[in-house]
Amino acid sequence: MRAAVLHRIRDIRFEDVPKPKISKDEVLIKVKAVGVCGTDIHLYRGEWKVDLPLIPGHEFSGTIAEVGENVRGFKTGDRVVAEPNIVCGACYFCRMSERNFFCENLKATGVDVDGAFAEYVKTKPENVYNVPETLSFEEAALVEPLACCIRGVDNVGIKPGDSVAIVGAGPIGLLLLQLTKMAGASFVIQTDLEEKRLSLAHELGADHVVNATKEDVPAVVKSLTNRHGVDVAIEAVGSPDAITQAMKVTRPGGRLNIFGVSPQETVWAVKPFDLYSKELTITTSYRSPFTFQRAVKLASTGRIKLKPLITHVFPLSEVTRVFEVLDKKLEKVVKVVMKP
Ligand SMILES: [Zn+2]
Ligand SMILES: [Zn+2]
């Protein structure tokens, strides 16, 4: 089959590789669409270290191509998405039953084992979910990031009436926007550096958008919240500056969720006194533990708008160029989806 293989840092090639062979307990999925995630860019840049060579791709949809002998409940041709994180069920963290992905033997498709930047990908049926005809394959590829965002909203705990600031209006920020509104946020302020993303945020329900290259974000948030700051701030960029900004706009006693994935070695400088004097509750969010089912339901009912987020669709054969463009930020994109 044809696949995109990451050989070394900044060296991803479209080439022939053996088609995955499934065991009796696995299914083979013919990939129809796969999203390019910030994580994939981290892998490409070496900012998140993994064993190479690797076929990345963890946000995917497709159809069932082969079903292992022991697998029940799926048949060839089923339209599906799959949770990329595969847990062992037997380690300390799995047995603690705390519903997280701290499994000591976690194997994520597209991060630890070969993923979906390929014609075919294999996985376990426990990780697979059917999706309806009404959801396009491109949209279905966004179920994975949506599941991650549900975890973030769960962790920070949006309450009806909360005012919220979301720093960053990329695909994640725009999914968080829709989820926080749905969870009862009374007022959502969204910031970004790009006008195109901010107008999309506005279309998708942001009550106020701030271009951080033109306006002072903390000053704007203060003026919109009686000088208090927001009840909840969510950082959806993956950079220390964005975290600092999110922290600044959170009111005393408020909650902050650091959602964005910063490069592994990046350090965030913070004044402990600022934390002390505000009694902030800080949460983070790690992947999508047990939120996939809910993401499938929200996406399938159309209550979450996924289509407007997809600004670019490319054939997988163009993977080398796509990664160069994204790495160097040569083009303004929101979500890029590739098709094998
Ligand atoms: Zn992702
Ligand atoms: Zn485990």
Image (tube, helix red, strand yellow):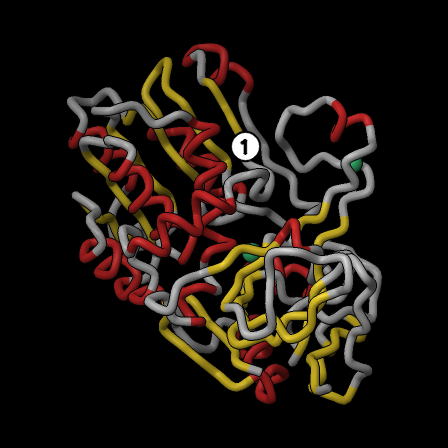
Q: Position of residue 249 (x, y in %)?
A: 33, 30
Q: Is residue 7 above or below residue 227?
A: below
Q: Is residue 300 above or below residue 120?
A: above
Q: Position of residue 156 (x, y in %)?
A: 43, 27
Give the quadrant of ligand 2. top right
Q: How many marks?
A: 1
Q: Residue at x 75, y 64 (%)?
A: 68
Q: Is residue 80 above or below residue 17?
A: above
Q: Is residue 146 above or below residue 306?
A: above
Secondary structure of the residue carrying numbered label 1: strand
- Report whether 302 appears left or right of 5: left
Q: Residue at x 71, y 34 (%)?
A: 102
In the image, what residue type sits under mark 1? Answer: Thr
Q: Residue at x 83, y 67 (%)?
A: 52
- Report whether 307 appears left or right of 108: left
Please give the residue where the numbered disc 1 appears in the rendered image: 284
Question: In terms of depth relative to the viewer, which is nearer, 122 or 202?
Answer: 122
Q: Position of residue 247 (x, y in %)?
A: 42, 29
Q: Residue at x 18, y 57 (%)?
A: 203
Question: In terms of depth relative to the viewer, which is nearer, 204 or 88?
Answer: 88
